């Protein structure tokens, strides 16, 4: 068996049965990386010596009768997480030598669960792109087509999973940064409910690793199966022990249903502000057909759905006001002048981005209040439905585009160009109100590229879209290994 593309669940079962050791799995993963990552460039900071030590300790622990959820499983971690002794740069050249002394809380949690950390995965500059490249570590390529991006900002993690570099990975998401790479690379990811998973230590250098409550942003699991997402989420979930963990314990509700036929699902593939490409529309249709064939109640419209155009504008305002909050004064003043020159009747997302970058606190509070109205609208919707199926982005993985003028970039949707960041509208649908969303593979495009969809669930009902993802995996299949050169064979 080729253990490099096995699931974490399969690896744990095999190690418990004595069929393979963590040392063998780790050596095999390292060999795969050394052979194939030259072309992909997913692992930007290898940590192989410590990984081999951790694997030996895992095997010794198992021989003593210990059994932890991830004991001996090789994993990777997004570069933006602090790992003691390794650089945390967020792709920013001025911090290439910044080395934290303490693990991020999630790195500490997966280590305590027995995981073997192979190294860190590549990210875009400042985590602010839907692609993955930076001056320090270079460009990460999509394993399905090296001329295309694996997505961002967790693109290194998604590419690593698709290429067989570890069974699990830690990522993060504010603009679809878990879900878009999963969609582009044909793997799974879960954006948890806002606040469900502690994020301390997933912080831009040189800031201290404080237990802050993030707005919009989350950290979450990536994997090659839906069940592995749940396995890793169960390790990650829970409040920070320095703050809410002093008083609260995690008690996630179970999935609303266990059978596909019991689910009530709203399916969306059209957005008022952006076209949906034919390949993605076909992926949504495959999922909708599988739901209907499995006996689920599938609807295409609901008066309870919050206004999609207003949701996209509001998400844009909240996202870009935060992004620009720490810009230098001279850059901020230039943005103010540009925003002042906009026509009063310009209601495009481009205009919303520019105006949001110079929001006052009063402006932000107004947007935050509107967000609460949307959250209440979603509560009403989820009284009638269990999940919403919709695109993650409007296209499969696009060719590398390293134009430094991000606001000047364009995305091609079936031959028509749109502003690059308009493609965030679907990811923002779940991010703005803080809802959980699971990215699942939905087959291949006519060009042979992966296509994914997201399953959005009720707030703190993360197990509901995760269970639906697991059921859909049985109906339409899941992870497929990318084409490419001959990969390493089974471990002997």
Image (tube, grey):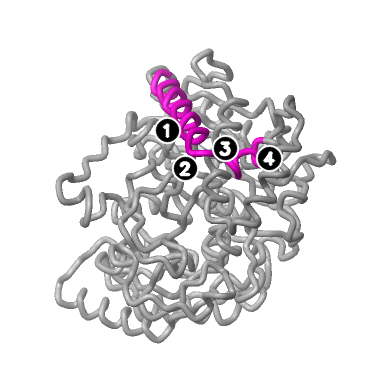
- Disc 1 to disc 2, C-alpha distance: 8 Å
The answer to whether 400 is drawn above or below residue 465 in the figure is below
Circle 2 residue: 438
In this orientation, which residue lies closer to the viewer: 102 or 486?
102
Circle 4 residue: 422
- Disc 3 to disc 2, C-alpha distance: 24 Å
Of pointers 3 and 4, the one earlier in the residue sequence: 3
For the residues bearing labels 1 and 4, Cβ distance under 8 angstroms = no
Q: Is residue 356 magenta?
A: yes
Foreground label between 2 and 4: 4
Element assignment for label 3:
helix
Of pointers 1 and 2, the one earlier in the residue sequence: 2
Of pointers 3 and 2, the one earlier in the residue sequence: 3
Foreground label between 3 and 1: 3
Coordinates of residue 169 in the picture (x, y in percent):
44, 62
- Disc 2 to disc 4, C-alpha distance: 21 Å
């Amino acid at each position: 068996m080729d253990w490099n593309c096995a699931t974490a669940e399969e690896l744990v079962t095999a190690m418990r049965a004595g069929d393979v050791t963590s040392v063998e799995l780790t050596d095999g993963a390292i060999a795969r990386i050394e052979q194939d990552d030259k072309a992909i460039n997913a692992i930007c900071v290898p940590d192989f010596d410590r990984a081999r030590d951790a694997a030996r300790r895992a095997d010794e622990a198992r021989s003593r009768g210990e059994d932890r959820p991830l004991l001996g499983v090789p994993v990777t971690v997004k570069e933006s997480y602090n790992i003691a002794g390794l650089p945390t740069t967020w792709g920013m050249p001025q911090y290439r030598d910044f080395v934290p002394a303490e693990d991020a809380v999630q790195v500490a949690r997966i280590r305590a669960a027995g995981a073997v950390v192979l190294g860190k995965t590549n990210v875009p500059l400042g985590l602010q792109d839907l692609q993955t490249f930076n001056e320090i570590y270079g460009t990460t390529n999509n394993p399905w087509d090296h001329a295309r991006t694996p997505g961002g900002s967790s693109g290194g993690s998604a590419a690593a999973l698709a290429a067989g570099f570890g069974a699990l990975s830690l990522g993060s998401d504010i603009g679809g940064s878990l879900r878009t790479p999963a969609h582009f690379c044909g793997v799974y990811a879960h954006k948890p409910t806002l606040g469900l998973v502690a994020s301390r230590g997933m912080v831009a250098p040189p800031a201290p690793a404080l237990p802050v409550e993030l707005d919009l942003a989350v950290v979450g699991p990536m994997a090659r199966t839906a069940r592995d997402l749940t396995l890793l989420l169960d390790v990650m979930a829970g409040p920070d022990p320095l703050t809410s963990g002093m008083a609260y314990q995690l008690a996630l509700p179970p999935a609303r249903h266990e059978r596909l036929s019991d689910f009530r699902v709203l399916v969306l593939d059209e957005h008022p502000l952006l076209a949906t490409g034919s390949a993605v529309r076909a992926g949504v249709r495959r999922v909708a057909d599988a739901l209907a064939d499995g006996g689920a109640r599938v609807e295409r419209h609901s008066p309870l759905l919050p206004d999609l155009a207003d949701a996209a504008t509001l998400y844009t305002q909240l996202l870009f006001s935060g992004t620009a909050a720490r810009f230098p004064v001279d850059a901020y003043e230039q943005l103010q002048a540009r925003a002042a020159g906009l026509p009063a009747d310009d209601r495009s997302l481009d205009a919303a981005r520019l105006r949001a970058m110079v929001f006052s606190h009063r402006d932000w509070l107004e947007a935050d209040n509107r967000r609460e109205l949307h959250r209440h609208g979603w509560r009403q919707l989820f009284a009638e439905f269990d999940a919403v199926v919709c695109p993650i982005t409007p296209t499969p993985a696009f060719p590398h585009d390293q134009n430094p003028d991000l606001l000047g970039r364009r995305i091609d949707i079936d031959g028509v160009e749109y502003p690059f960041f308009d493609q965030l509208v679907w990811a923002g649908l779940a991010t703005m109100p803080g809802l959980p969303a699971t990215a699942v593979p939905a087959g291949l495009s006519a060009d042979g590229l992966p296509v994914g969809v997201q399953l959005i669930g009720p707030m703190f009902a993360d197990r509901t879209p995760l269970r639906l993802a697991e059921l859909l995996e049985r109906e339409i299949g899941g992870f497929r290994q990318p084409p490419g050169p001959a990969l390493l064979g089974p471990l002997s």
